[in-house]
Amino acid sequence: MKKVAKDRPAIAGQWIQALMYLAAVGLINAAADIIPFMPWEASYYISMGIRFSVVVCLFQLASVHRFYRISSILKLVVFLCSVLTAFMKEAAILTFAAALSSMIAVFLEYRAHADLIKEKDAKFARKWMKLFLWGIASGVLLSLGSAVSVDLLSCFETDAARITSVIVGILEIPQFIVQFMYVAYLNKMTGLICE
């Protein structure tokens, strides 16, 4: 059984391009988090709208590759967990479920992208999996760096909140770069599919 439907380049190109535009809007929204220039609530609602739209795009790509369907379902779980955690005080289990689902969903999405483009550009297909690893590394760096900075700065009588926000802002830069590369890869992939 073949994982990639070869007769659907028009469908794939259209929805991959939609993913690219959503990722570009998400990149701008991520910049708003690093350099705050809009209210937190606006950034949150934009992020949630993007998440749901990505679920729809990936579901539309399900006829092209089976991993897109699984990824869309897992990203829907992440979306629902995010909505529920906004209304709950103790949501550690939901946060863990969302993080795990997100990691698996991104892996499957990138794997589907790589499989879809492998015949046209095998070297570029391998770059998708490297981008996944860079994304994991930047996420671990952000999580550990944030936790360590909060713990260390809480020991001192300084303005820990401001210092921590600066440190977290710096640690978000690698994630911003990974998101930028995701947009660039989707753009290149759209061109390769549509040629």
Image (cartoon, rainbow, N blue to C red):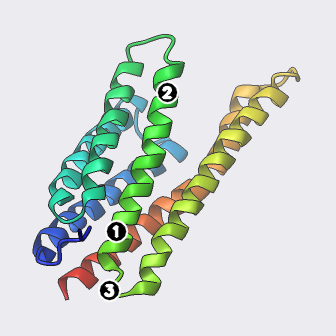
In the rendered structure, which amino acid carries the disc numbered 3? Answer: Glu
Amino acid carrying label 2: it is Thr
Secondary structure category for the residue under label 1: helix
* Number of residues whose C-alpha sits closer than 10 Å to that of mark 1, classed few (under 14), some (14–19) or many (20 or more): many
Q: CA distance from mark 2 to mark 1?
A: 27 Å
Instruction: Point out the frontmost of discs 2 and 3.
Output: 3
Residue identifier under label 2: 95
Q: In the rendered structure, which disc, 2 or 3, sits on the residue that comes first in sequence?
A: 2
Q: Is residue 104 above or below residue 119?
A: above
Identity of the residue drawn at 34% across and 73% down:
115
Question: Which of 148/90 is in front?
Answer: 90
Query: What's the residue type where badge 1 is placed?
Result: His
| Residue 113 badge | 1
- Lower sequence index among marks 3 and 1: 1
Question: Among all residues in the image, which is located at the extreme front?
Answer: 1
Q: How many marks?
A: 3
Q: Label 3: which residue? A: 119
Give the alpha-carbon distance from disc 2 to disc 3, as whole Å.
Answer: 38 Å
Residue nearest the observer in this picture, 33 or 86: 86
